[in-house]
Image (cartoon, rainbow, N blue to C red):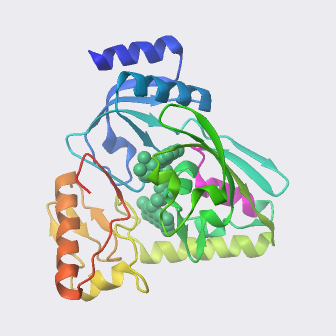
Amino acid sequence: MQWNDLIAWIEEEKLGAVRANEPMADHTSWRIGGPAKVMVWPEDTAACSQLLGHCKTTGIPVAVLGYGTNLLVADEGIDALVINTREMNWILWQDHQVRAGAGASLAVLAGQAARRGLQGLAFSIGIPGSVGGAVLMNAGAYNGMISDVVSQVVVLDLNGGQQVLSKEDIHYGYRVSDLKKNHWFVAEALLTLQPGDREALEKEMNDCLKARKEKQPLELPNGGSVFKNPAGEGAGRFIDRAGLKGLRIGDAQVSLKHANFIVNLGHATAKDTYTLIRTVQQRIQQQYGISLEPEVVFWGLKE
Ligand SMILES: Cc1cc2nc3c(=O)[nH]c(=O)nc-3n(C[C@H](O)[C@H](O)[C@H](O)COP(=O)(O)OP(=O)(O)OC[C@H]3O[C@@H](n4cnc5c(N)ncnc54)[C@H](O)[C@@H]3O)c2cc1C
């Protein structure tokens, strides 16, 4: 009943398209996950603020979804209002700065920057996430990180209250940020880029995409790097050396191409995938005494 009331309220307030029992498997790159009780697609920050405020007052759990490219959702789904940021995908350029909504594509932004001869985002061309997810997770690759170019982030707290944070307020580290720690909703970000050479940037991006295609199992559904790299070495190297490439539980398999990826061979469940993640962690702990920390985020599964 609570969920029907919520849907009726969202429709009445015109806060975005809304659906009940939306399969999360349709919204994650792993193609895994049971239904979200309610999913809403707000179009602006004001609508998000209203949604968060209402859920706080009524005690309804909320979860924020970007492009679902770093997310493992339980087979039972999630009893929450899932705020899908896809419609908040505006991008506004001004000289060498760009302001983008949470739901803008990082890869689209990187392409636009290169065409404008602006550097600072080329590293992100193959990262399939949203600006909001990238800013929260401090997405990075090839020695670049989104925090290198973030100048300002507009966030909402759990009550829906808006704040404008500077990079210094966020305390970025390797795949961590205070945004994540404080469960803030990232509504928009201002990025500052530097003048660069368009041709060189386009070449750098093409090389990067080619390298990813060669090294990563992009032909199968996956959730990106499963584990953070322990200091000094790639998590994939340990997994490979331990002989775990190809290890399979149900249809979840440690990729034969890149050991830090787990691929869905067709009908992998969250349970299969999660059990495989735990198995890999245990084997690496036993063999090397190293505790691998997941980079992927779990919804409805114990971290
Ligand atoms: C093939 C592949 C390659 C990848 N390569 C890389 C890589 O090189 N480097 C890298 O860093 N990552 C990589 N990733 C992982 C992923 O793309 C990034 O972590 C990305 O930043 C996640 O963004 P998303 O929009 O998909 O977030 P989601 O997966 O939707 O969400 C991830 C987390 O962020 C939260 N979140 C999302 N949007 C918001 C928001 N607006 N406000 C608050 N919280 C939010 C969610 O609640 C969740 O906790 C890769 C993934 C894949 C599938």
| Furthest residue in direction right, as rendered | 95
Image: magenta residue range = 102-114
Quadrant that contains the N terminus = top left
Look at the picture and state if 301 lies above or below 147: above
Q: Residue at x 39, y 68 (%)?
A: 225
Quarter occupied by residue 203: bottom right
Q: Nearer the viewer, residue 163 or 198?
A: 163
For the point 65% across and 60% down, which residue is it?
168
Residue 5: x, y in percent?
A: 35, 14
List x then y, in percent, for residue 15.
53, 21
Asked if residue 67 shows in the view, the reply is no
- The residue at 34%/58% (across/down) is 221
40 vs 74, left or right, is right
Tell me if 190 is positioned left or right of 11 in this view: right
Residue 106 appears in view: yes
Q: Position of residue 263 (x, y in %)?
A: 29, 64
200 over 186 or under it: above or below? below
Residue lying at 47% horizontally and 30% vertically, measured from the top left: 52
Name the side, left or right, on which 56 lies relative to 201: left
Q: How many marks?
A: 0
Query: What secondary structure is the magenta-colored segment mainly?
Result: helix
Position of residue 179 measured from the top left corner of the image (x, y, whole percent): 52, 52
Single out the residue that lies furthest toward the left.
250
**Toward which corner of the image does residue 188 lie, by quadrant?**
top right
In the image, residue 79 sits, relative to residue 217, either above or below, namely above
* Quarter of the image with the C terminus in it: bottom left
Magenta segment: does it hold 30? no
The residue lying toward the viewer, choosing from 136 and 114, is 136
